Image (spheres, coloured by chain):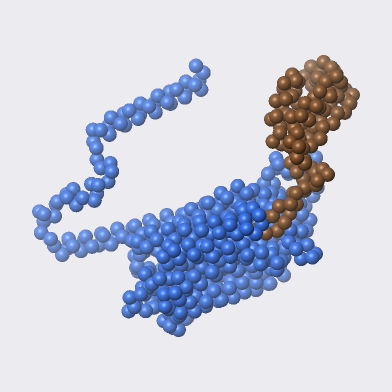
Chain colours: A brown, B blue
């Protein structure tokens, strides 16, 4: 089993969700998040004084999936979330040890 | 159908039935649906044709029509007073939006506490100091027990009737109407200071400031201008135009609040992190720009009471011009501030544009009854530009004013007072302050040939600054020996809400907990128990 985690621009969330739904995934989890990458934040002016927006808002998407599907899920997210501009985000895949469904106690593949 | 749906359907049917019944009933007895009946004299009952005209009847008619005029003025003054009261809501939104989320509960509490505490201080002594010796107000019925003033003739200094709305026989409806209208004006000066002292003043220190404003700083200066005091008499004593003229309080209310705020901001010092070692300023953006816009719109709405209500009567038909001038100046101020920030910083600054609207409103407050609409536009335009440069000016001097109170109310209040001395066109205010009773002209500014009026306005600006800034500075030079007026650095960094009041404005949106003795995990903001006295100040 794999966990696919993606950080994308918030306004791309709908595109990503639709693309993932097209794959027939059972579920995804999203979280509002903030951070910075290589470009750091950007500068604005407020009442005559400059300030840096240090943490840029992002949406964090998490998808639990089988080993076979993980790469396909990641590629789908990458394609749907790409604008070509700086700050498009990242996607990474990590191995998962155990998955348990809370309601039934089903384990691993049955629980995905 | 479910119970809920039945209820909705029944309600709808009842509603429709009522409309039908109402419509049918209405056709049976059409009265005067559009109003012309009231304007056609022929429709009045012609009872007088059967009775000879008598002196008693005429006296009765004159008396009841005079009573009606006073009733209209009472109603007008009360309702505009209620509008000014509503400005308190606008200001609470404005200053809370312009500050950080971690202090939002503290900001709101300051706003409502300012209202209650300053009102009681004004009731106890402030009102008497300000209006204890005012000349009778014809619009509100004329005769008044407010006839005690300390100081002779044209050199009145402080009123002496009306302490606790009681002393000197002031248990009187006319006095009550005047009190209601004037106390909400004092509240305006009272909440102005909140903007400049935000995010660092201790609640205890703040309450002292409010009592000082409500009991001393505002009322005494108000007496000199509006309560029959010496500055109103500059026209008769020094032959300076119509004396210092301030229609609704650019100087009396706004500049007083703004300069008092300056004195407090100087005592407190800037917020932690506002200024760098090289002297440059950091932006500390407010947490809720929609609040700022809502607050500003509520304030311009309330200003429709602030300025037109200052006639103390709807029988003075100048109210139409006053209202329009007020709107014009506010909107021009907004547009000019929007344009100026766009030119200087590359984008229109929302909070500064809102400040521009308020700056225009503040500036037109003194001249609104004395100038033509074109002059109101110019006054508002200057205010909208002035406020942007003024904010930068105070920032360079490291006077930290999170909401721009000093620039909006102090600087533009002074500009508004001066504007009377420039643009007043002589069509209103004949005999104002008892000056030039034989003159056919009202208040005239420099551009209409009366340089003396401008000198009187300069008196108002300079003495207004000296009094409001000086009195507040002195009071707090003493107060800060006894009261901790600024919270500790730890409290300021974590936010004032929990240390000062034990509650957060937005518990669900901040990684912090307000649980006391519960099982909540300890986070940054709750690392100090709510009961710790780190933020307590007394």
Q: What is the quadrant of the C terminus of chain A in the image? A: top right
Frontmost residue, B65 versus B345:
B345
Picture quadrant of residue A67: top right
Picture quadrant of residue A65: top right
Question: How far across and down, in percent of the image, does residue B246 sit?
Answer: 47, 70
Frontmost residue, B198 versus B345:
B345
Frontmost residue, B70 versus B413:
B413
Residue drawn at the location 28% of the way across and 29% of the way down: B24
Asked whether, in this view, residue A47 is left or right of residue B378, the answer is: right
Q: Residue furthest front?
A: A84
Marks counted in the figure total 0
Question: How far across and down, in percent of the image, does residue B275 sit?
Answer: 75, 62
Q: Is residue B291 visible?
A: yes
Q: What is the quadrant of the N terminus of chain A in the image? A: top right
Asked whether, in this view, residue A61 is left or right of residue B64, the answer is: right
Residue drawn at the location 63% of the way across and 51% of the way down: B97
In the image, residue A19 above or below residue B81: above
Asked whether, in this view, residue B352 is left or right of residue B433, the answer is: right
Residue drawn at the location 64% of the way across and 67% of the way down: B262
In the image, residue B132 above or below residue A95: below
Frontmost residue, B486 versus B493:
B493
In the image, residue B266 above or below residue B89: below
Question: How far across and down, in percent of the image, does residue A5 sit?
Answer: 81, 31
Residue drawn at the location 69% of the way across and 60% of the way down: B201
In the image, residue B473 above or below residue A22: below
Question: How far across and down, in percent of the image, does residue B410 sit?
Answer: 58, 67
Q: Is residue B313 visible?
A: no
């Amino acid at each position: 089993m794999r966990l696919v985690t993606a950080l994308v621009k918030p306004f791309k969330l709908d595109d990503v969700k639709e693309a993932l739904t097209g794959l027939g995934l059972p579920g995804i989890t999203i979280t509002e998040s903030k951070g910075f990458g290589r470009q750091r934040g950007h500068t604005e002016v407020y009442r005559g004084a400059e300030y840096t927006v240090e943490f840029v808002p992002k949406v964090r998407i998490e998808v639990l999936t089988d080993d076979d599907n993980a790469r396909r899920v990641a590629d789908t997210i990458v394609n749907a979330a790409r604008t070509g501009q700086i700050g498009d985000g990242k996607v990474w895949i990590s191995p998962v040890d155990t998955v348990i469904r809370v309601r039934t106690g089903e384990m691993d593949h049955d629980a995905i | 159908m479910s119970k809920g749906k039945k209820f909705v359907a029944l309600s709808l049917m009842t509603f429709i039935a009522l409309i039908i019944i109402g419509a049918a009933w209405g056709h049976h007895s059409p009265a005067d649906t559009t109003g012309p009946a009231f304007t056609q004299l022929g429709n009045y009952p012609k009872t007088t044709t059967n009775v000879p005209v008598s002196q008693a009847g005429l006296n009765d008619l004159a008396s009841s029509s005079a009573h009606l005029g006073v009733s209209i003025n009472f109603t007008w003054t009360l309702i505009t007073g209620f509008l000014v009261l509503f400005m308190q809501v606008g200001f609470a939104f404005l200053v809370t939006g312009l500050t950080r989320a971690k202090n939002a509960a503290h900001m709101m509490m300051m706003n409502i506490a300012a209202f209650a505490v300053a009102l009681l201080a004004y009731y106890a002594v402030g009102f008497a100091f300000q209006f204890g010796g005012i000349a009778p107000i014809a619009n509100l019925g004329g005769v008044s027990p407010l006839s005690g003033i300390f100081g002779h003739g044209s050199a009145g200094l402080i009123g002496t009737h009306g302490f606790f709305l009681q002393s000197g026989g002031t248990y009187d409806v006319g006095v009550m109407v005047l009190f209601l209208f004037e106390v909400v004006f004092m509240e305006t000066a009272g909440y102005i200071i909140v903007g400049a002292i935000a995010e660092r003043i201790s609640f205890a220190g703040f309450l002292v400031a409010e009592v000082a404003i409500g009991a001393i700083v505002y009322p005494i200066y108000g007496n000199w201008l509006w309560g029959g005091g010496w500055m109103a008499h500059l026209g008769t004593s020094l032959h300076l135009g119509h004396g210092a003229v301030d229609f609704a309080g650019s100087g009396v209310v706004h500049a007083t609040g703004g300069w008092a705020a300056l004195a407090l901001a100087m005592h407190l010092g800037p917020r932690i992190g506002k200024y760098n070692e090289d002297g440059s300023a950091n932006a500390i953006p407010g947490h809720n720009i929609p609040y700022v816009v809502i607050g500003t719109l509520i304030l311009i709405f309330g200003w429709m009471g602030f300025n037109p209500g200052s006639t103390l009567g709807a029988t003075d038909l100048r109210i139409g011009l006053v209202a329009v001038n007020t709107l014009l100046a506010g909107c021009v101020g907004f547009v000019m501030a929007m344009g100026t920030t766009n030119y200087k910083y590359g984008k229109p600054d929302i909070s500064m544009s809102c400040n521009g609207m308020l700056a225009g409103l503040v500036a037109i407050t003194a001249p609104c009854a004395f100038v033509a609409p074109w002059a109101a536009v110019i006054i508002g335009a200057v205010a909208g530009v002035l406020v942007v440069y003024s904010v930068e000016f105070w920032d360079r001097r490291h006077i930290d004013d999170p909401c721009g109170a000093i620039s909006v109310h102090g600087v533009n209040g002074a500009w508004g007072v001066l504007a009377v001395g420039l643009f007043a066109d002589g069509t209103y205010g004949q005999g104002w302050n008892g000056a030039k009773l034989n003159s056919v002209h009202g208040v005239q500014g420099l551009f209409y040939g009366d340089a003396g009026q401008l000198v009187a306005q300069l008196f108002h600006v300079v003495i207004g600054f000296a009094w409001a800034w000086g009195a507040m500075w002195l009071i707090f030079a003493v107060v800060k020996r006894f009261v901790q007026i600024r919270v500790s650095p730890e409290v300021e960094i974590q936010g004032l809400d929990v240390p000062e009041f034990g509650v957060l404005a937005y518990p669900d949106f901040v990684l912090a907990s307000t649980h006391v003795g519960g099982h909540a995990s300890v986070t940054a903001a709750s690392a100090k128990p709510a009961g710790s006295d780190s933020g307590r100040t007394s």
